[in-house]
Image (tube, rainbow, N blue to C red):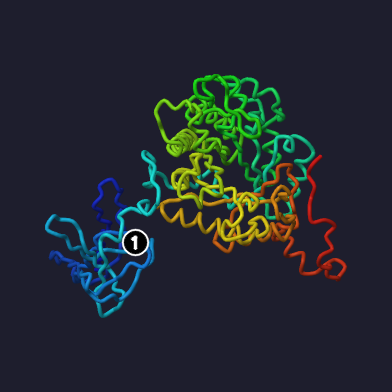
Amino acid sequence: MITTLLISSGCNTQNSSVEEPAPTDVVVEEMETNEDESETVETVEETEPVVEEPEVPANLGIRYVKKNNVNVRVEPSMEAEVIGKLPARTEILIAEEITDENGVVTWIRLDESIEEAHASWISAEAVVEKKYELMYTVYEGVEYEPIREIPNFEKNPRVEVKGIYVTQHSASNATLDKLIEIADTTEINAFVIDMKDDNGNMLFDTMAAGMFCPEANKRAPIKDMKAFVDKLKEHDIYLIARIVTFKSPKYARRYPDRAISYNNSSRLYKSGDNITWASPHDRQLWAYNIEVAREAAEAGFDEIQFDYVRFPATGRALDKQLDFKNPDGASKALTIHNFLKYAREKLTPYQVYISADVFGWAATNVKDVGIGHHWEALSNVVDYMCPMMYPSHYGPNNFGLSVPDAFPYETINGSVKDALARDANLENPAIMRPWIQDFTAKWVKGYISYRAPQIRAQIQALEDNGVNEFLLWNAVNRYTVGGLEPEVKEEVIEAETETESGVEPVEGEAVSDTLTTED
């Protein structure tokens, strides 16, 4: 007779919580036997011989070179031959450490030799263990260790943003359609819309304002928020809610005891634009801004952008005359850092991203610019850093330029390089998305007019440094379309294989290089 042997094959796992796959019947072979044969046929499984892999010694960790031109020596001695040099911020793997009689590490052997024939040693004094230790300034209480991974929400996937600023006025009249036209025909794919503007006014009637500052609702221009959001989403526009955070005059006037005032006086501080400032230390104001942000997220915004998330630029001398209502004695940098941490905690459940507008100079100044903008303290918390790199906002000889406004490419190039260097101090820095200039700064001595070439030059400087996102600022929403790349659509590319008339269009015949969106 013919007998078929079946072997049950399965999967052996060490984790009992993983369900074992069902046995699979596998035909091994057919063999002939006698009918009367009662002998049991035994099968023997063949096993592969186990080959032991040679053990690879693990490195002893990572260190970072803290200064330029650190000598690499052939032996762990200051008298040993120098066989190479390492630049600052170089990441090294440790193969061996030598300690002194007190157990202090004095020399480190690199995991990979500078020269193949030699070991490579550097002094332990030349390295640090944590990236943030490379910083010139560290503020007490601020967390510089990784505290979050930048999310990519399932219901709100990240977008490579190229956006424009939109006022409440523009959002509520016919200008909106002109701005949508820009998004439909160029690379622009996002609007930064004033949710809470510089005067503290709401975009739509909010419960937050009703609770904390009812007068902020009085001029809310959008009456049907769902229709407003739906209209923009029909054009695939990514929506960013701009919330002017601590420059909050309506709130400050309502709660003068919580606002920044002069010492031993009820007189409130006002900035150069005659705006009263609330105190960034005020936890009730934190709650107000976060509730506004939450309602924006629920209304359909994809991202919350905190602007004026800082202290007023008062200077050290004036600071001594002001009462910032700071009962805990926290530094400005720590207060802004903690507010943004609080914002992330409260808003992450709504699957919105968090961004912060910061002074462009914060990337170059190693401290907090006197306003709480310490670059690493912010970049370690938010998802997007939005430095305001307007060339007009840099002074004479910044980046070696006589008038930075007159050199848009060079100014952005210098600023973004400084920002990238600061991000190198962190394990998980925010994604960079700078604000750039689409206006002519006539108040700057030696200014130039900003038209299409100047807009393009700024964008090119970002791209040349690997930064592919940007936001255009124009206070009255009048944007230079000629400086933007046209939107590329598959159907348009296919249609261009043959023009209707058979004649190629003449380059440079555009009617205007600027689309006016002001009423």
Looking at the image, which is closer to me, 313 or 517? 313
In the displayed structure, 186 sits above or below 306; it is: below
In percent of the image, x 28 and y 79: which residue is there?
Answer: 116
Looking at the image, which is closer to me, 335 or 216? 335
In the displayed structure, 182 sits above or below 50; it is: above
Q: Quadrant of residue 47?
A: bottom left
Q: Which residue is outermost to the front?
A: 317
The C terminus is located in which quarter? top right
- Residue highlighted by disc 1: 65
Q: Quadrant of residue 185?
A: bottom right
Q: Position of residue 39 (x, y in %)?
A: 12, 65
Quick check: 232 left or right of 174? left
Q: Position of residue 153 (x, y in %)?
A: 50, 44
Quick check: 167 left or right of 334? right
Q: Which residue is outermost to the bottom?
A: 117
Number of residues whose C-alpha sits closer than 10 Å to that of mark 1, classed few (under 14), some (14–19) or many (20 or more):
many
Give amino acid for label 1: Val
Q: Position of residue 201 (x, y in %)?
A: 66, 28
Looking at the image, which is closer to me, 436 or 242? 436
In the displayed structure, 152 sits above or below 101; it is: above
In percent of the image, x 65 and y 36: which residue is there?
Answer: 194
Q: Quadrant of residue 76?
A: bottom left
Q: Secondary structure at mark 1?
A: strand
Q: Position of residue 206 (x, y in %)?
A: 62, 25
In the displayed structure, 325 sits above or below 130; it is: above
